[in-house]
Image (cartoon, grey):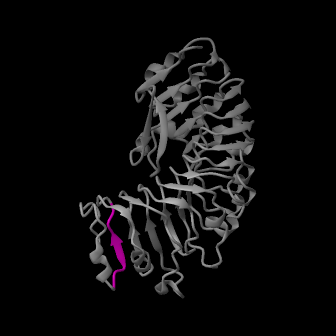
């Protein structure tokens, strides 16, 4: 039953209680308000696909048991989307057979230990976990060995503290990591060194410190988005960053990096060709505003190293990045001339070299 987008609210559709053989339920964006009836959560354990997102539901989400149809069916997937509503309370244990529990933009609170560390089932199917835009706090628990198949991890816009736990090194299939706008600290997480399939790393607006490790440019051959803005990173930019040939979005603004801009930035071949290969999302600061790029991210390339302590000149190698659409080198200590070849960068839409 797929009636997503139908304005069936504001009351919960009680007629669902009479449906006995439903395997898919989509009542997303239905203008529904109030609590989800207890009987519906029992019904949901029979479904393969559950979408309650973009409504105005309130109250807590109960423990949802593994559907009987999943027992002994290791290849089956159970999808659950509860995002963009007003669910609240602590995150309770869900079945480890849920592949995509989307809990984005709710009011869940407290820590993650019960949710992540109480798993008992050996069939761990969790691949995409979206907990962004809640009120989660405490430290990130060190029990990621329970979720070795994780591919997308989004915990942005919460109140998480502490560092990135060591057990995240087991997430060797991780493609996307987003911890933007929390209160995380410590050095750049060494536990990510094993996550060599990453396409996106967003650690912006936290309190990470220290120098960037050289392996950041060596261990992620398919990295396309690297956003570390508004932290407390320092030291020189490692030359090894230039090995990130697929990089389309580089944002290191609002840190205290020093030294010169690496001469090898012309190696960012995705910025040379305007390469289009990623279906991902990113928050980008450009033209003095913040933009959310989703499906059109593949059309955009940018470099932002503003508000640091970088010195020296702007290398002529910058002008090789013919596919670059935006760059911001403002608020540094750069000197010398603007490279003559900048006029050949035909894709450019925005340039900021102010306050140098």
Q: 345 or 214, which lies in front?
A: 214
Q: Quadrant of the C terminus?
A: top right
x%, y% of residue 233?
Answer: 70, 34
User: On the rendered structure, is 85 left or right of 150?
Assistant: left
Q: 70 or 339, which lies in front?
A: 70
The vertical placement of 237 against 143, above or below, is above
Q: Which residues are magenta?
A: 21-28
x%, y% of residue 277?
Answer: 46, 50
Q: Quadrant of residue 240?
A: top right
Residue pictured at 40% horizontal, 27% vertical: 349
Residue pictured at 66% horizontal, 71% vertical: 118
Residue 1 seen: no
x%, y% of residue 50?
Answer: 40, 70
Principal secondary structure, stretch drawn in magenta: loop
Q: Quadrant of residue 247?
A: top right
x%, y% of residue 283?
Answer: 48, 40
Q: Quadrant of the N terminus?
A: bottom left
Q: 264 or 31, which lies in front?
A: 31
The vertical placement of 99 against 300, above or below, is below
Residue 170 seen: yes
Q: Which residue is at the far left?
A: 7
Is 53 contained in the magenta span? no
């Amino acid at each position: 039953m797929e009636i997503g987008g139908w304005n069936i609210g504001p009351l919960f559709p009680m007629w669902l209680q009479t449906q006995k053989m439903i395997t898919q339920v989509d009542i997303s964006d239905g203008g529904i308000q109030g609590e989800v009836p207890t009987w519906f959560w029992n019904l949901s354990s029979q479904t393969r696909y559950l979408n309650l997102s973009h409504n105005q539901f309130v109250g807590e989400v109960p423990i949802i048991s593994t559907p009987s149809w999943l027992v002994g069916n290791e290849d089956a997937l159970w999808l659950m989307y509860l995002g963009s509503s007003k669910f609240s309370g602590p995150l309770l244990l869900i079945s480890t057979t849920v592949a995509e529990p989307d809990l984005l933009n709710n009011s869940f609170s407290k820590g993650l230990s019960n949710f992540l560390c109480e798993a008992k089932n050996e069939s761990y199917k969790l691949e995409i976990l979206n907990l962004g835009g809640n009120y989660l706090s405490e430290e990130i628990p060190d029990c990621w060995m329970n979720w070795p198949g994780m591919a997308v991890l989004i915990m942005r816009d919460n109140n998480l503290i502490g560092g990135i736990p060591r057990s995240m090194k087991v997430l060797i299939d991780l493609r996307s990591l987003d911890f933007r706008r929390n209160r995380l600290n410590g050095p750049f997480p060494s536990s990510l060194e094993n996550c060599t399939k990453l396409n996106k790393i967003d650690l912006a607006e936290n309190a990470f410190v220290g120098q960037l490790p050289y392996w950041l440019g060596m261990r992620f051959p398919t990295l396309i988005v690297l956003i570390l803005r508004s932290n407390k990173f320092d030291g020189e930019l490692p030359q090894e960053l230039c090995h990130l040939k697929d990089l389309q979005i580089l944002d290191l603004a609002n840190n205290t990096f020093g030294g010169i801009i690496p001469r090898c930035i012309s190696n960012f071949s995705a910025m040379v060709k305007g390469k289009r290969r990623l279906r991902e999302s990113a928050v980008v600061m450009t033209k003095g505003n913040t933009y959310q790029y989703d499906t059109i991210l593949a059309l955009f390339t940018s470099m932002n190293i503003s508000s640091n302590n970088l010195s020296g000149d702007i290398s002529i190698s910058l002008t090789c990045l013919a596919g670059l659409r935006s760059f911001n080198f403002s608020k540094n200590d750069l000197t010398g001339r603007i490279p003559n070849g900048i006029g050949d960068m035909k894709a450019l839409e925005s340039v900021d070299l102010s306050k140098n």
